[in-house]
Image (cartoon, rainbow, N blue to C red):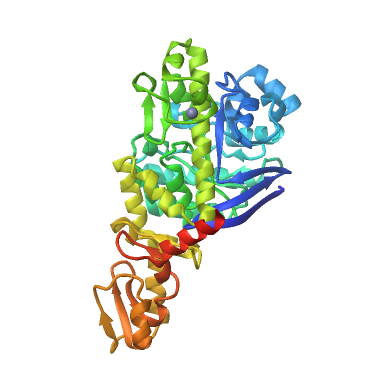
Amino acid sequence: MNVAFEVKDRDVAGRLGRLEVNGRRLKTPALLPVVNPNKPTLKPREISKLGFDGVITNAYIIRKHEHLREQALEEGVHELLGFDGFVMTDSGSFQLAEYGDVEVSNEEIVRFQAKIGSDVGTILDVPTPPDAPRSRVERDLETTLKRAREAVELDEHPPLALTVQGSTYEDLRRLCAEKLAELPAAVYPVGGVVPLLEEYRFVDVVRVVLAAKSSLPPHRPVHLFGCGHPLAIPLAVAMGCDLFDSASYAIYARSDRYMSVLGTLKLEELETFPCSCPVCTRHDPDDVREMGPRERTRVLATHNLYELRRVIETTRQAIVSGELWELAESVCRVHPRAWAGMAELARRGGELERWCPAVKRSVFVCDEVSKGRPELRLYRRRLRDRFGELSGRKVVKGISRPYAEIVEWLEPWELAFADEWLGVVPGELSWSYPCHCLVEPSGDDEGEDRRRGEEGRRR
Ligand SMILES: [Zn+2]
């Protein structure tokens, strides 16, 4: 197995990276559009032209249909799809969750994925629905772990995706991740979250992802299986998810739904297209409403993919700019349940501290949710653990940033500032990170000035 995952930049727990498997490269965070090998809404070649380096398809469906199976075994899955980029395959676990049974064993589907040349293949894990009785979850989990062990020991297997299951039980998710981390994998997906996403249970998504992530090895990418929702992507990247897949671009298109920054909109309600992708520039909603169903689905699916690409690329840039938390906050504000997920992440910000960059250019704070930012928690903890006694200092209250002017006419080590966001700031730290670059709703912020100054220089 020739797999390398290189992390080039990071913010919160999000990573900007590059996954290389058998010579095929994928920039992460990445979204893999789902391609139905039987009747693709858009051909993988067309998807590639929209700026996607990889796709995911279903090995179970390929194996089930003779004409697909024969061609895939003879020529490989890349040739079958007419696509030379990164191809991940799923195993039939989704069908197992939907229909309760599949006509293939774990060993058969893992070997099959190797034979057709999948870049990453998935074990036949057992997705347990949310809120299932604990005894059932434990039983399913045992099966998933047994199948993972079986797959890695086969003489023939593709680079593997070993899926973390455990329903909505955080301790079982952690346990499953711990056991899988002992086995070699190319990718560790977090599975069984589609029902949570469909019901907008963002709080539970945050809980299960954080539980899995806490025990997974940091040198491998994490895939949030079935997550292709623009609202969820920045939040999930902030928790450390690197890969996503989406069938939603096509499913939504088939029912005349249009992805946008305002959430998912119905074609019949659209007055205008709030997007400047090539599709939306060329057409207006009336044009598209008049199209036949096939053409309309293609046009909407193409726009939906452009929208997903915009979200992924914006998220990638936010990592580089150190503004991933700000992006996740602004995107989650669109829906109250997504916002509840963001609030849950803030409440558990302590779990993200260890991934957080040591220094940033600026830190924006807006409200109670921002107070949970890992950067602020990290400061408070370091102050507690590493800074000496603060008692005996004069505590200055009600002063707005920057504190430096006051420090100038008093000895800094005699002062401490009571700070709404950071708790307490010793005088001598008032010039240092994050105190000097915190941007709050009121006040004369050095951080904001610095940012404006830098923008000025760029122009
Ligand atoms: Zn568009």
* 373 relative position to 88: left or right: left
Above or below — where is 411 with respect to 441?
below
**Number of numbered discs overlaid on the protein picture:** 0
Query: Residue 432: horizontal and vertical position, in percent?
Result: 44, 74
* 272 relative position to 114: left or right: left
Q: Residue at x 61, y 35 (%)?
A: 51
* 72 relative position to 377: left or right: right
Depth check: give the residue in front, 381 or 176. Answer: 381
Above or below — where is 322 with respect to 237?
below
Instruction: Name the image quarter holding residue 231.
Output: top left
Instruction: Name the image quarter holding residue 372.
Output: bottom left
Depth check: give the residue in front, 350 or 455. Answer: 455
Q: Which residue is drawn at 38% across and 52% down?
A: 170
Instruction: Name the image quarter holding residue 48.
Output: top right
Above or below — where is 284 with respect to 10?
above
Q: Can residue 351 be seen in this view?
A: no
